[in-house]
Amino acid sequence: MHEVKITMLGPSGVGKTSLLTAMYEQFESNIGRTNLQIIPDLESSAILQERLAELKSLPDSFETKGWMSSTENYRSFLFELGKKGSKPSLNIHFQDYPGEWHESKSSLENKEMIESFIKESAAVIIAIDTPALMEKNGQWHTKINREQQITSLFKKAYGDLDSPRLVILAPVRCEKYLQSAESTAELLRRIKEGYAKLLDLLKVENLRTKVAVVVTPVQTVGTVVFSRIEMIDGKPHFVFRKTSHDAQYNPQDSEQPLRYLLRFLLRLHLDTRQWKFFNFLRDWLGLDNDLKRAVYEFANGCKTTGGFVLLQGETLLNNPKS
Ligand SMILES: Nc1nc2c(ncn2[C@@H]2O[C@H](COP(=O)(O)OP(=O)(O)OP(=O)(O)O)[C@@H](O)[C@H]2O)c(=O)[nH]1
Ligand SMILES: [Mg+2]
């Protein structure tokens, strides 16, 4: 079966696994409205179910670390996408790894693995710890989000890129910053500033036409907001609180990265140019017009306001009417 890989990218604790969990949870509820279905393999389903239970058992006030366990080993989560009641037509592999691999103490082998994940993935979802970027003038951004290292990884992985890619910047834990139009605009400004080097890199001659870049803020819990930073032994502890005592897990927009992904794949499917990496997409939807329509419909639900922006590569995401 045809297969695409996606990398969840980011240092430890930024929220890669939580984002994947929230995506998984919303796949069904959102895709359910179209003729599409997504089926996780049994193992992925079991693990994500457990993470989901953890995400749902929110304490009233908590620190970022310590409420869910961090990822210990590399894992690939497999989802099969297809038309309802038919055989799946595409395998989507999400690669999730321990963010610790970014740290200097981890082996070179692990760092090279991150690089090859980026290389072989059609799309990379960069999870961004938003409070680190926004609070105290971004004082903790570099320490927590490691944006320089991420830029270097892309520099190597996209060194001789010969086919299109999608880069999704996904600010998470961003509930506080999406409250008003002003704060949303400020969030976007800070993303452009905080990731300026990466965005500049993706704009160079060979990459500009091949890499689409979007920002999709995801509220992975929906009902917790950043409250304050407490300094303990010189280390920042980001404290969050629930919007009310009985506020429940209510993720917002977590299926958006997947919508953008399908939009990108659909565009490539319809592309008349030959991209070796994506040749398999040519007959992905085959003659199945129902499936094509379902993918189109789902992809058409990409948000473009309220913090969602297309920073580069419009033609790679432009869907001709089907
Ligand atoms: N405030 C807030 N915290 C969250 C949210 N989602 C997850 N968390 C917390 O963030 C912590 C880290 O999230 P993970 O998804 O495990 O982070 P990760 O990037 O997978 O980290 P590693 O597995 O170590 O690479 C979790 O323990 C949760 O406590 C959210 O939406 N808001
Ligand atoms: Mg993880």
Image: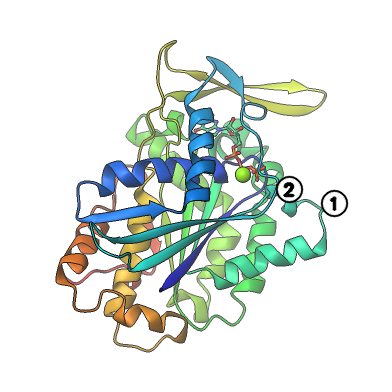
Q: Locate residue 223: give its quadrant.
A: top left
User: In screen coordinates, is 59 left or right of 275?
Assistant: right
Note whether ligand 1 is within 8 Å of mark 1: no
Quarter in which the N terminus is drawn: bottom left
User: In screen coordinates, is 148 left or right of 291?
Assistant: right
Q: Amino acid at mark 2?
A: Glu
Give the mark, 2 or 1, whose residue is nearer the N terminus.
Answer: 2
- Can you see residue 302? yes
Residue drawn 51% across the image and 49% down it? 44
Q: Locate residue 135: give its quadrant.
A: top right
Q: Amino acid at mark 1?
A: Lys
Q: Are marks 2 and 1 in contact (CB under 8 Å)?
A: yes
Quarter in which the C terminus is drawn: bottom left
Residue drawn 60% across the image and 41% down it? 14
Q: Estimate the x, y position of residue 320 in percent, counting from the top left.
A: 19, 72
Residue drawn 23% across the image and 69% down it? 319
If the picture is divided into quarters, which one holds ligand 2? top right
Say which residue label 2 marks.
100
The relative height of residue 310 versus residue 72 in the rendered view (above or below) is: below
The relative height of residue 98 versus residue 130 in the rendered view (above or below) is: below
User: In screen coordinates, is 122 left or right of 17?
Assistant: left
Say which residue label 1 marks.
105
Q: Estimate the x, y position of residue 89 in percent, counting from the top left.
A: 33, 68
Q: Estimate the x, y position of residue 165 in percent, counting from the top left.
A: 46, 71
Q: Locate residue 2: give its quadrant.
A: bottom left
Note whether ligand 1 is within 8 Å of mark 2: yes
User: In screen coordinates, is 172 left or right of 38?
Assistant: right
In front of the other: 236 or 257: 257
Q: Estimate the x, y position of residue 299 in percent, counting from the top left.
A: 26, 59
